[in-house]
Image (spheres, grey):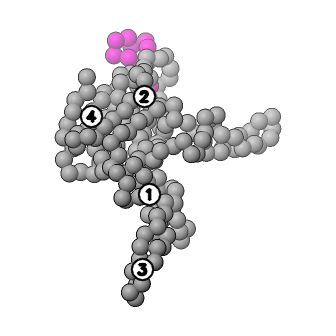
Amino acid sequence: EPATLGCGSEACRTLTTWPWGLPPVSFSNRHNKCRIFHLETLHLAGDEGERIVLADNKCKCVRVTSRIIPSPENPNEDILERHIRIIIPVNSRENISDPTSPVRTKFVYHLSDLCKKCDPVEVELDNQVVTASQSNICDEDSETCYAYDRNKCYTNRVPLTYGGQTKIVETALTPDSCYPD
């Protein structure tokens, strides 16, 4: 059962993890509350190694890592430990590019969506270098962002008054991503 904490005045809160192997999890920030979920470990045999980043989704504020650790019950067995860190942007809007849209109250996370790798990579296949995507479920339009992805350019139209005249102008919400220099 998750514990519920008051979020206070901070813009974001960190949710440590959610129960592994359950259906997609929805979080709500109604009444200015945050929920904390704890991750169960998945037991597998394997080599001991460092923590590997499986997903670092800046759009959804989620980072998924794993590492192989010795089993506390059986020294001849290793287990795969997964760690999921979620930062909930409590004051984010339904449409992050529109500051007048309502505050978001529902956050949904699908592990399969978080871990997909859609950026093309070069791989060698039969002595030929080809470009491929590491996922077959890539759909750019399906991802809802809860925070700005600093690698993408976000803009919005705003009124600008100058010399007594008001004009609607396009402005960059993430200038570093919109302007290369």
- The residue shown at (41%, 58%) is 98
Magenta-colored span: 67-77
- The residue shown at (34%, 51%) is 102
Tag nearer the camera, 1 or 4: 1
Are circles 2 and 3 on residues that touch, CB within 8 Å? no
- The residue shown at (47%, 44%) is 144
Mark toward the start of the polypeptide (1 vs 4): 4
Res 61 → quadrant: top left
Query: Residue beneath label 4, please?
Result: 35
Instruction: Identify the residue at the far bottom of this view.
Output: 163
Q: Main secondary structure of the magenta part?
A: loop
Instruction: Classify 10 Å Cα crowding around label 1: few (below 14), some (14-19), many (20 and above).
Output: some
Q: Secondary structure at mark 2?
A: loop
**Residue toward you, 97 or 55:** 97
Tag nearer the camera, 2 or 1: 1
What residue type is disc 1 on? Ser
Mark toward the start of the polypeptide (3 vs 1): 1
Label drawn at residue 166: 3
Label drawn at residue 24: 2
In the picture, the quarter occupied by the N terminus is: top left
Query: Residue beneath label 1, please?
Result: 97
